Image (cartoon, rainbow, N blue to C red):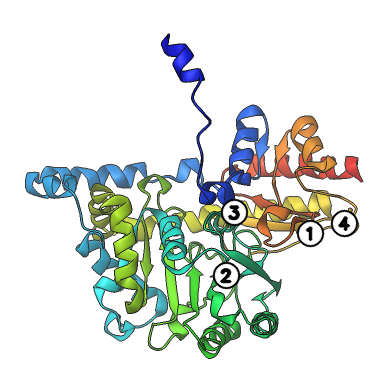
Amino acid sequence: MSLDQFTTSLPEPKFSRRWHWGSDQPISYLMQQGIANPNCISLAAGFVDQGSLPAVEIREALGTLLANDERAKRALQYGTTHGHVELREQLLQQLARLEGVPAAELGLDVDQLILTTGSQQLLSITGEILLDPDDIVLVAAPTYFVFLGTLNGQGARIVPVETDDDGMRMDALETKLGEIEAAGELERVKLIYLVSYYENPSGRSLSLERRREAVEIAQRWSKSQRIFILEDAAYRELRYDGPELPSIWSFDADHETVILANTFSKTFSPGLRIGYGVVPRALERPICDRKGNEDFGSANFNQHLLCEVMKQGLYESHVTGLRKLYTAKRDAMLRAADDYFADIAGAEWVHPHGGLYVWMTLPESCEASLSGRLFQAAVEKHGVMYVPGEFCYAGSADNRPRHQMRLSFGVQDEAGIDLGMRRLAAAVKDVL
């Protein structure tokens, strides 16, 4: 028998339920469309500005790190599961600056801060250690669609909660928890997920009062087991105007309810893949146990490099420049929305105070989903791409709004943003 005959007679592989639950995610399709349509202007990609990436800062820090042979070799060795301790100590100081208090008043041990491969790894591991299949996670409607895919892959039951301009409505959260308790399933509620600053996708921030309420609600409803809040603060430092808000985590007095996730992917370099979590003591060991099984510790060299960047003061100056750059880009997108969409009855959009996204709602007759006429017309005829808003909702596909879009101003320059918005408005008018 030939090798070809042997291999073609093998049965099909049998994949796990987790793979089936998490397969066919929209991010893969959108990336495929971007490659298949290279002349499209992408208002879909949630990437950072290519020209802003800190090559100069990295070169300077790298030279210092490699100049000392002993330091360089420590960086090139395996690290620890918690991550490089000097960087974690610097991050505690940074968190204290963001919260406006001395580091000693944070009430944290450095081991409660865990370095991860981007914040996405922390989001995933949190689900892995807390959720059994059919356990419940409450999320905003809309919310970060990549995490929805992660939760689906873990077999979670995702319950959407209504939002308004101040983020997730706390009265709606209470109602959902009451319904779950009445159904005898409160013990299955493990997590409330909140993107607290300039949410991906909506650009909205949770209001000050709702931050306090969210912690109180999670603690009050922790009747048969603890309900954690997972606060995703990925865009916190990309504030352009508007109020400077404390974290949800800051309202958790004993720091045993809120898991705070952050990342350097948006504010410095996604290629370094460095994120971190500030975690309750009860979760420190479970997270590290799971993480150690996955990676023996995230990239040690990258952590040493970022540590040097921060020691030299290169990070803060970089973020200051980013805010100026993205303020101009956001303003360009909002101007273009005024110029090209103002005459479309029923079209409206959020004016975000930070982040990378503008959330647009179209007339209900203009279906913006992948299967709708608008997406095809935008990509194939007009040469522009967006993220359909339907991806950002949990629950039954039949009940999701289909007339919304997430628009990103991170990648394009101001001219590209203007042209992309003009093309998108033309596609909408074609469909209407």
Mark 2 — residue? 137
User: Any mark on residue 328, and which?
Assistant: 3
Q: Earlier in the sequence, mark 4 or mark 3?
A: 3
Mark nearest the camera among 1 and 4 is 1
Q: Earlier in the sequence, mark 3 or mark 2?
A: 2
Q: Residues within 10 Å of mark 2 (few under 14, many from 20)?
A: many
Gap in angstroms between the C-alphas marked 4 and 3:
28 Å
**Quick one: SS at disc 3?**
helix
**Quick one: SS at disc 2?**
strand
Tell me which residue sits at (60%, 83%) in the image. 210
Mark 4 — residue? 363
The amino acid beneath tag 4 is: Pro
Badge count: 4
Gap in angstroms between the C-alphas marked 1 and 2:
20 Å
Would residue 42 be found to the left or right of residue 255 on screen?
Answer: right
User: Any mark on residue 354, and which?
Assistant: none
**Quick one: SS at disc 4?**
loop
Q: Residues within 10 Å of mark 1 (few under 14, many from 20)?
A: many
Query: Which of the two residues, 243 or 155, is positioned nearer the viewer here?
Result: 155
Mark nearest the camera among 2 and 4 is 2
Mark 1 — residue? 401
Q: Earlier in the sequence, mark 2 or mark 4?
A: 2
Gap in angstroms between the C-alphas marked 1 and 4:
11 Å
Would residue 32 be found to the left or right of residue 315 on screen?
Answer: right
The amino acid beneath tag 1 is: Pro
Mark nearest the camera among 3 and 1 is 1
Q: Are marks 2 and 4 in contact (CB under 8 Å)?
A: no
